[in-house]
Amino acid sequence: MRHWSAALAAAAWLATISSAPAAESVSSDRFTVGQYLGLETAAGPRLSPDGTQLVYTRSAFNKQEDKTETSVWIVGADGQHHRFLAKGAGAVWSADGHSIAYLAEGEPKGLQVFVLHLDVPGPATQVTHLSEAPANLRWSPDGRWIGYTAIVPDAEKWNIELPAVPDGAKWAKPPRYTERLHYRQDRVGYTERGWRHLFLVGADGGAPRQVTSGSWSVGDASFEVAEGVKWDFTPDGRSVVIEGLKDTERDRNDRDSYLYLVDIASGSVKNLTPRPGAWREPVVSPDGKTIAYIGFEHTDASYRVADLYTMSVDGSGATLRSAGFDREPAGLTWAPDSSALYFTAEDRGSAHLYAWAPGSGIRQLTKGSEVVRDVSAGRAVVVGVRTTFRAPAEVVAWNLRKSDEPHLLTRLNEERLRPLKLADEEELNFASSGGAQIQGWLVKPPDFDPARHYPLLLEIHGGPHGMYSTQFSAAFQNFAANGYLVLYLNPRGSTGYGSAFGNSIAKHYPGVDFDDLMAGVDTVIKKGVVDESRLYVAGCSGGGVLSSWVTSHTDRFAAAAVRCPVIDWISMLGETDVPNFTMRWFKKPFWEDPTDWLAESSLMHVDKVKTPTLLMTGELDMRTPIPQTEEYYAALKYRGVPAAILRFDGEYHGTGSKPSNWMRTQLYMMSWFQRFGGPAGAPPPR
């Protein structure tokens, strides 16, 4: 149900108490929130089997319906002959290169599988009519079948005998019943019991055939609410290799996931990775001899880089291929002749393209400040999506026989951004407690003048096992356009710096990451360009954890915007859709020893908070649910700390999935900061 009236009332109330307008004061050549609405992004490029063209998904905002819409486009591998194909996403090629399958809204309501024959005039054909949404499409090698995954409902039932309902009576709905630990999921809502399985449907339609069955689910089980399913056909089309968790109770599973070989004809299942661990992302080499995958053996570490492995298709000969690499491969894709395996990996704020080949190990193929993802390999070219600090995601191609810069295949935002003065960033490297070396970046306003003092916003990433990168950030560009310096960094616990760095906050979160954040602020202040009376801090999710922790451990910040936080770990365990993840942070359950649970909860330190705090959370959030925000808000109000709460309509975790809410997030934060000394325009001279 929508609550637009409540949202409007809240906005009107905030306007009456705020002396600063929730609006920008910048010139037309800056990146305002309105510029955000015109951005488009590219994702999921897939080369045709002959390497001459590719399909990809383009995303754009529908301003009228306040949502993101996707469409499938095709373009030559040389960047020529761009053409719209259909509304939808996730297109994959048939083996002969004459057809694509993709997902789009169909009948009955919801996502369905469509097939478009590129050599035949006419519209695409809807080949499924499912009640449960399909996902993770693959073509069979002979082109006769399309594989997909979908949920098979298996509703929990508790039958009782009520008296007959009187004619015309309107009795309450039955209560929602479950005996599962995981009965809700962010971006989904409350769930019924069901199992995700693999299906095949004919390329021309017809009744689907279920390949896997039983009370277990295919898909990556290394995170308790993961939705993705990585799987692949063997080249003979007789089997598939797929992620899953078959012989362990998924409700209590914490990060174990296995790879299975499934016989399509019989449905028989063989575990290829019997040692407990987080084994995932299998891809079968085109010659059918080798499976590449990533993973690690079971560990109690809070973070562990997944290593690259290969094994024979029968599961024998498992071999570590990334010894000493200490970075996590993602998006594995084989060269058509099986001679090399391509992937991307995060590394120190960037994500680069790499190749592994027998006998030569891992080679880095790209360099510089960039984020590369979604790669697809041909005989002489690799395509992917690339973004930099000043350029949103575009499709690019790398010539494998040359070492020159990538060839830009799409230019979705070039004309929109050309007349704008965008912010620049400066990389920072500094020491923190214990001698830890930390990397961060300082975003500077357009026309930055080192002779001025600027307000500084410390923005903290979530995860906490995540990584801020040098990719394009509309939020950072917008804050810089409004006269802010923005500091973002990767404190200990972040990914992209190896296992030891990521695991350094295990059983103590928050902890040394707070030291790293403060060291970053101190480093920027030493540059002499910061107005220390106008320091601000913000962050969502893990960034909400840390921004609330920051204000309960220092009063150096003039105001804070704490978004979708966790502030009470004990109540979090019973409210979140990731209870196993929550439990992982502590040595013992709180009913055995609550000491750490309390000590690491910002709520228990609220008596020290003096910083005016704006709290922002989605009404539907099931990851860091809004009761966390409400608890903290009540405590702040009881203590007399200036505080406000914004409950975002229609939002799950985060506050910006809807374009209008992304703009509201930016403007409310700036308005709150303005109330406590933030800029209404350009920063004053010294």
Image (cartoon, rainbow, N blue to C red):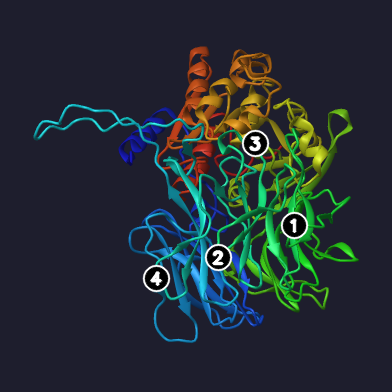
Image quadrant occupied by the C terminus? top right
Report the amino acid beneath label 4: Gly
Res 69 quadrant in image:
bottom left
Residue 389 shows up from this direction: no
**Discs 4/2, front:** 2
Q: Earlier in the sequence, mark 3 or mark 2?
A: 3
**Discs 1/2, front:** 2
Q: Residues within 10 Å of mark 2 (few under 14, many from 20)?
A: few
Q: Residue furthest left?
A: 167
Q: Earlier in the sequence, mark 4 or mark 1?
A: 4
Q: Where is mark 1, residue-wise? A: 315
Image quadrant occupied by the N terminus? top left
Q: Where is mark 2, residue-wise? A: 265
**Discs 3/1, front:** 1
Res 313 quadrant in image:
bottom right
Res 647 quadrant in image:
top left
